[in-house]
């Protein structure tokens, strides 16, 4: 960061490091409860996205696209080792 701003002095690098460390220290000391709540929120979002993926995998709205049993056949074909790239 010191080079991008034109500060070539070694003291500029030390000051930027010190300021960054102090900012991180303040965040850690003041925001432990905030960090835990944010992590729980991110975990909930991740769980919802996994649930959405699972529901979307087995529920589809275009029933005319597949014949009965074709979805299971496509699933087996996609997870088998024969359905792989040419370099395998």
Image: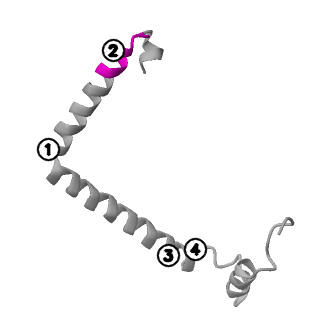
Q: Position of residue 38 (x, y in %)?
A: 25, 54
Report the predominant secondary structure element of the magenta stretch.
helix
Against 3, residue 60 (above or below) is: below
At a point 37% along the width and 20% down the height, the residue shown is: 13
Q: Check disc 4 and report the residue beneath it.
A: 61
Kindly state the secondary structure of the residue where label 1 is placed.
helix
**In the image, which is nearer the foreground, mark 2 or mark 3?**
2
How much space separates mark 2 and mark 1, taking CA atoms? Answer: 27 Å
Closest to the camera, between mark 2 and mark 4, is 2
CA gap between label 4 and label 3 equals 15 Å
- Under tag 4, what secondary structure? loop
Q: Which residue is mark 3?
A: 54
Residue found 33% across the figure and 58% down from its top? 42
Foreground residue, 16 or 60?
A: 16
Q: Secondary structure at mark 3?
A: helix
Residue hosting label 1: 29
The tag earlier along the polypeptide, 4 or 1, is 1
Work out which residue is located at the far bottom of the displayed protein and give it. Answer: 69
Q: Are marks 2 and 3 in contact (CB under 8 Å)?
A: no
Rounded to the nearest angstrom, the CA distance separating label 1 from label 3 is: 39 Å
Marks 1 & 3, CB-CB < 8 Å contact: no
Report the magenta residues as a range: 7-15
88 lies left or right of 21: right
Quadrant assignment, res 20? top left
Disc 2 marks which residue? 11
């Amino acid at each position: 960061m010191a080079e991008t701003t034109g500060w070539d002095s070694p003291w500029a690098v030390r000051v930027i490091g010190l300021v960054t460390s102090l900012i991180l220290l303040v965040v850690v000391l003041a925001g432990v409860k905030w960090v835990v709540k944010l992590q729980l929120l991110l975990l909930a979002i991740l769980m919802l996205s996994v649930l959405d993926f699972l529901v979307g995998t087995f529920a589809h709205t275009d029933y005319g696209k597949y014949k009965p049993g074709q979805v299971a056949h496509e699933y087996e074909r996609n997870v088998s080792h024969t359905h792989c790239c040419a370099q395998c």
